[in-house]
Image (cartoon, rainbow, N blue to C red):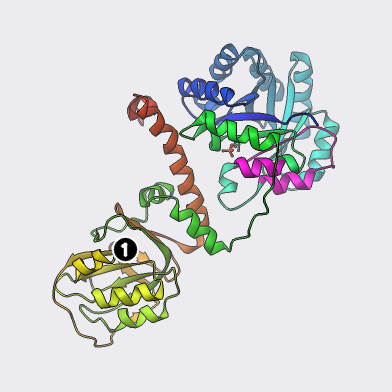
Amino acid sequence: MTRPTLQVALDILELHRARQIAREAMAGGADWIEVGTPLIKSEGMAAVRDLREAFPRTEVVADMKIADTGTMEVEMAAKAGASIVCVLGDADDTVIAECVRAARLYGVRIMADLINVADPVGRARELESLGVDIINAHVGIDQQMIGKSSVDLLRSLAGEVSLPLAVAGGLDAETAAQAVAAGADIVIVGGWIVRSGDVEGSAARIRAAIDAPAIAPAKKKSLEEEIRSLFLQVSAPNVTDAMHRKGAMSGLIPLTFGVKAVGPAVTVQTFAGDWAKPVEAIDLCRPGDVLVIYNSAATHVAPWGELATRSAINRGIAGVIIDGATRDVDDIRALKYPLFARACVPNAGEPKGFGEINAEIPCCGQQVRPGDWIVADESGVVVVPKERAYEVARRALEVKKNEERVRAEIERGSTLSAVSELYKWEKK
Ligand SMILES: O=C(CO)[C@H](O)[C@H](O)COP(=O)(O)O
């Protein structure tokens, strides 16, 4: 069996960084360099020229995602130094045929990308008869965020065409190995390598995984377990970044440090100091829920304290958020319990029993519905609409990964402004 090809996709905006990342990825065992679509849009054919010059003996793939004007775009990429040019598999047959003709003329190969194709098997067969050289089973980055899998797409194509099969979309060491076991000849990896703090090491891990694919049987998680495990890997700032800087509650103080609360909300609304409903709600929570209490934003009286906290711990409640006050902060800190409130005050209220459990509530500037996800840490509290929880959790992990490479470059002596070419990207 020939060794699978590892193609590193440079999906970043800055050419000077792309060159360095490509060097590190090659040192880790990458075979081909892909000039990613974002890099082409940011730097144009200069990026292809530059990477060809820097890597004269490597296949350079220009991910042009051609949708029209096939000849012109293949010609420009080929003349800039690409040896493989990508066309959208969904493009009209006339475009594909033009790309293929131009590719023959300029001595390059065409990779057809199946992103968004409604009938991948049928279209892959047509693309083969139109003369493309490689089929790419590709699930795009936005599609990955809602759970689409490139390995599943690849599996559906195995044995259906006789062309080399590439696979791309959210691959890591584990899924890259699965892809090779499912028949991938070319494994395309972007984010997992290029956004990593250790590009060379990450490329080496993919290399090792695809050269000797050992597939461990994966334990299937429920959607809730999957969402929780994703949110536990990220911070509240990563989550607001993933939501275009929305969802953050304001005015809350994290009362215990070094702890984090992640889980679906159980909501309570009650009048200032009336602690009956908050305490009754404890018994309705499932382990892993987060109790979110609207106590009329009152800071002069507390509906929560040490005994309620001990009860919450017994129920396995992941944390408590109060749009209002708490007391017994010293005891709660000693218990290392994740509690977020507007204020601390010694006054307890009274258990009158007004209010409601599991209705939509306001809380510190956000609306919270039962089941919405809460991510709370020392930076503050974010609420994520339940319908978007999986997608936002995936996106938050991308935000975190993106910061890893930037952090590594700053640790090597650069600055945030230089890494991100801040002046260039200021809004004109
Ligand atoms: O073409 C792309 C996005 O349209 C990417 O290059 C491809 O998806 C690989 O990147 P990642 O591994 O981050 O998904």
Q: Picture coordinates of residue 347 (x, y %)?
A: 14, 76
Near-viewer residue (263 or 367): 263
Quadrant assignment, res 23: top right
Q: Picture coordinates of residue 360 (x, y %)?
A: 38, 72
Q: Which residue is mark 1?
A: 338
Q: Taking 84 as reference, is 117 above or below it?
A: below
Q: Picture coordinates of residue 217 (x, y %)?
A: 68, 54
Q: Name the amino acid, label 1.
A: Pro
Question: In this picture, which residue range is highlighted in magenta?
Answer: 150-179
Q: Quadrant of ligand 1?
A: top right
Q: Taking 161 as reference, is 314 above or below it?
A: below
Count of marks overlaid on the render: 1
Residue at the (55%, 14%) spot, across then down: 50
Q: Is residue 49 shown in magenta?
A: no
Near-viewer residue (78 or 305): 305
**Is 139 placed left or right of 322 in the picture?**
right
Q: Is residue 423 visible?
A: no
Q: Picture coordinates of residue 153 (x, y %)?
A: 72, 46
Q: Which quadrant of the figure contains the C terminus? A: top left
**Is 141 placed left or right of 262 in the picture?**
right
